[in-house]
Amino acid sequence: MDGDPAVRLLFAADGLALGEFHCWPDDPRWSRENCAEEGHFVVFPGTSVVIEHAGRPVVATPNHVMFYNPDQPYRRRLLHPRGDHCAFLLVEERRLAEAAGGEGGSFRFPVSHGPVEPRTYLLHRLVVRVAPSAGDGLPVEETLCRLLREALTVGLRLAGTAAPRRRAATDGCHADLVEATKELVAGRLGDRLTLGEIARSVHSSPFHLARVFRARTGFTIHGYRNQLRLRSALDGLFEADVDLSFLARRLGYSSHSHFTDSFRRAFGRTPSSVRRAGRAGGAAELSRILEAPLAAAS
């Protein structure tokens, strides 16, 4: 990653690094195969993008965490007009094995992606803001270890609770149906879509779509859309000149209070308190501000 203008390294400790990746629409990476040659990556998408690795395209959104094994080839397809923007953890194998409950031996991700809890997502967004200016690296490293453990615990759960084996054709049709739905929802976050409208757009029945989507993602379609809206709101919260009422309307909420209530239920904090936390900066803020929400989420 040295010298790559798309990569910004934010923090590095023993066997663990935090960084940002910014791939704009004119980047040549869109037209070629890429490779996770540096090691194991745990990636938190900030914008929606189609990633094809481990055999099937996945619509990667802020609702998911993506896993890349060393030297894993993959391709990306543009969805969001700004391109592919994400935060990542580059983790040594021994630390991954320990975080997954092993003894520090060999480790490979058994799945390509999984869901990420709302407060884990909030944690990663705040630590990305705090880490570059932290004078004391210990709280940052401890927070990254917790972030890694929580992402693995929930994200890898799909590997241990996989549905009974179906015929390959049926399984592939279900996967395609879910990815088409995710792409539709991600592209129309502010629209008040009905289940029937979504089902017709992806050529399915409402009942079948709702059942398959929840079985494969862990979300209802409404819950998936709501989480995408709330996680998208974090970008606006950290901009000083963005009014919260305007942000709520832009994301499709009926009122400021509806947005605030939904945000508090998801993240355990109000939008205004998260805005203050993101502006405060400093490693001490991670310990003081984030400990209570994380304890409530665990």
Image (cartoon, helix red, strand yellow):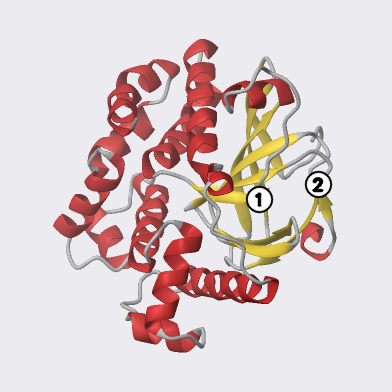
Quarter location, residue 175:
bottom right
Q: Using the image, determine if residue 239 lies above or below residue 254.
A: above
Residue at which label 1 appears: 112
**Which amino acid lies under the numbered mark 1 shown in the image of this protein?**
Ser
Quarter location, residue 269:
top left
Q: Position of residue 47 (x, y in %)?
A: 54, 56
Residue that appears at 77% across and 62% down = 30
> What is the CA distance from the residue labelled 1 to the residue labelled 2?
11 Å
Quadrant placement of the N terminus: top right
Residue that appears at 47% across and 27% down = 130
Q: Using the image, determine if residue 114 lies above or below residue 122.
A: below
Asked whether, in this view, residue 66 is left or right of residue 289, the answer is right
* Circle 2 crowding by C-alpha within 10 Å: few under 14, some 14–19, many from 20: some
Q: Position of residue 106 (x, y in %)?
A: 76, 26
Q: Using the image, determine if residue 297 lies above or below residue 198.
A: above
Secondary structure beneath dot 2 equals loop
**Which amino acid lies under the numbered mark 2 shown in the image of this protein?**
Gln
Q: Using the image, determine if residue 211 lies above or below residue 71.
A: below
Secondary structure beneath dot 1 equals loop
Residue at which label 2 appears: 72
Q: Position of residue 98 (x, y in %)?
A: 62, 21
State which tag comes first along the sequence, 1 or 2.
2
Label for residue 160?
Answer: none
Q: Nearer the viewer, residue 162 or 173?
A: 162
Q: Position of residue 196 (x, y in %)?
A: 36, 86
* Circle 1 crowding by C-alpha within 10 Å: few under 14, some 14–19, many from 20: many
Q: Nearer the viewer, residue 219 or 158?
A: 158
